[in-house]
Amino acid sequence: MKIGFLGPRGTFTEMAARGLFEKGDFLPYRTIPACMDAVANTEVTVAVVPIENAIEGSVNMTLDYLIHKQRLPIIGGITVPIEQHLLVHPNKEGNELDKVVSHPHAIAQCHEFLQKYYPNAEWEYMNSTGAAAEYVKKHPELNIAAIANEIAANEYELKMAHSNIHDFDNNGTSFVVLSKEPMEVEFKGAAFTEEKTTIMVTLPSDYSGALHQVLSAFAWRKLNLKKIESRPTKTGLGNYFFIIDVEGAMDDVLIPGVASEIKALGCGVEILGSYPCYTLARKEANV
């Protein structure tokens, strides 16, 4: 099996991919769209991409590209605990820095640390924490540091100037596994958490109270919603679709009943996936 992930090597996404798949050909891609395109073009069997962070919220790039560009089935999910470290080149000490590089979410997760210890350092955003670590490795002449994980430190032979610099201890990122067609994959290596079904709903523009009616369809069937989120349809101001995560797997009665009821209201409904979710233990994440 060929498994694409947001690279380069040493990212949390690679950590998530290896937490789900014990073996396979792991292929890094520089961006989330490139990773998803690789699945659509059958370069890889599946792709692992970030979908939500506990501190910074949803990864909008993933959601928007999934909805507007590559409508790929979600076949699995995993949550990885996030521990961020400040990494410098081996010949540097990290006492004074001109610049800190990393993914925007990683920098935001370490905002208090950066303001306290490096208030004058510039921030530069990278496609991933792994890309930031790779950049520091390739530029020993620069007085810079990367925010990344311990795997990236080992991969790029960087020195850990400060460890555990994230602002919140209970930080974690959820990732989804995408395939070109719905398929069953045997996941190994992580602890099973729950079954989840993700639904996309588009509301009619001329129906007052449509969202209330949509939520009622879940409520009276006693289906628990794990998350509901709006994203712009990109067709004009005020036009949104909703991504709804439902606790439980797709069944023959309840969720199909919800879909039918919502469609009767004039809403658009699409099941993006019904899939198992896993959690990587903190000690496994740092191996």
Image (cartoon, grey):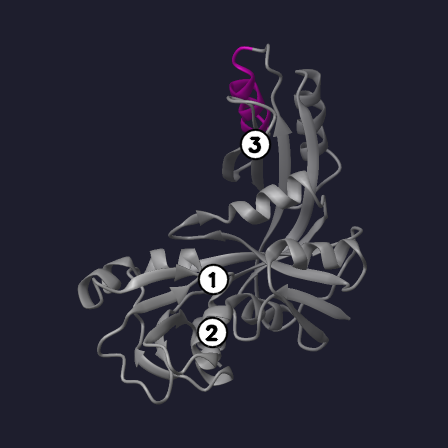
Quadrant for residue 267, please give it.
Answer: top right
Asked if the residue at tag 3 contacts the one at tag 1, i.e. Cβ–Cβ closer than 8 Å, the answer is no
Sequence-wise first label, 1 or 3? 1
Q: Amino acid at mark 2?
A: Tyr
In front of the other: label 3 or label 2?
A: 2
- The residue identified by callout 1 is 126
The magenta-colored residue range is 208-222
Most frequent secondary structure within the magenta stretch: helix
- The residue identified by callout 3 is 242
Residue 1 locus on image (x, y percent): 77, 71
Q: Amino acid at mark 3?
A: Phe
In this rendering, does residue 170 appear at all? no
Nearer-the-camera pick, 280 or 45: 45
In front of the other: label 1 or label 3?
A: 1
Above or below — where is 254 with respect to 190? above
- The residue identified by callout 2 is 135
Above or below — where is 158 with respect to 119? below
Nearer-the-camera pick, 155 or 267: 155
Residue 179 among magenta residues: no
